[in-house]
């Protein structure tokens, strides 16, 4: 005979007794808490998986996006910063034209955002990079920075065209 059968035979009278008052309520409450915990864990895992998937797709798409042709021209220019600023000023003119139909307050916000991007490009990152940074790394960082600012303004144009 195994130990379980022996234990049951020795304690048979305890198995025939009724449980104390409130036992079934406490049992159901504990069971509901376990179910709730399982549901929360499943939801948490599903949300985490969704966030990871969106992040992975974003990273993948970011790597597949080729640089716009005007960015390639600026990266090879003698004064890369001024090349990008010239292109940004061209886009800024287009933004000014596209915002003529907007309400004054909305137009002011868009033009202020546009101006902030141009000023950040003009004043920004160059002085903040460490001196010991290799010239190739400096060039790559700056070209990415300028290109992203130009793309931000081009995105503003696309949104304004849709409005």
Image (cartoon, grey):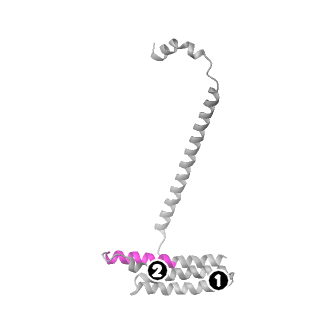
Between discs 2 and 1, the one toward the N terminus:
2
At which x and y percent is residue 115?
A: 54, 83
When asked about the image quadrant of residue 91, the answer is bottom right
Mark 2 neighbour density, 10 Å: few (under 14) some (14–19) many (20 or more) = many
Q: Which residue is mark 1?
A: 99
| Alpha carbons under labels 2 and 1: distance apart | 25 Å
User: In which quadrant of the rendered image does the C terminus lie?
Assistant: bottom right
* Magenta-highlighted residues: 133-150
* Residue depicted at 64% across the width and 81% down the height: 107
Residue drawn at (61%, 30%) of the image: 26
Specify whether residue 149 is painted magenta.
yes
Q: Which residue is mark 2?
A: 71
- Report the residue at 49% width, 70% height from top: 65
Residue 88 badge: none
Q: Is residue 62 magenta?
A: no
Query: Label 2's element?
Result: helix
In the foreground, 152 or 125: 125
Secondary structure mainly formed by the magenta segment: helix
Residue 8: x and y in percent read 52, 15
> Residue 73 placed where, x, y %?
44, 83
């Amino acid at each position: 005979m195994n130990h379980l059968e022996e234990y049951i035979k020795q304690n048979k009278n305890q198995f025939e007794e009724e449980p104390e008052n409130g036992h079934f309520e406490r049992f159901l409450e504990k069971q509901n808490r376990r179910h709730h915990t399982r549901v929360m864990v499943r939801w948490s895992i599903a949300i985490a998986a969704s966030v990871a998937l969106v992040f992975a797709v974003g990273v993948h798409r970011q790597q597949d996006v080729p640089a716009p042709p005007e960015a390639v021209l600026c990266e090879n220019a003698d004064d890369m910063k001024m090349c990008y600023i010239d292109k940004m000023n061209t886009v800024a003119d287009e933004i000014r034209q596209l915002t003529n139909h907007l309400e004054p307050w909305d137009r002011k916000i868009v033009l202020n955002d546009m101006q902030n991007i141009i000023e950040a490009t003009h004043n920004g990152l160059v002085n903040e990079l460490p001196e010991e940074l290799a010239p190739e790394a400096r060039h790559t960082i700056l070209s990415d920075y300028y290109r992203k600012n130009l793309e931000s303004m081009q995105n503003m144009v696309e949104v304004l065209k849709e409005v």
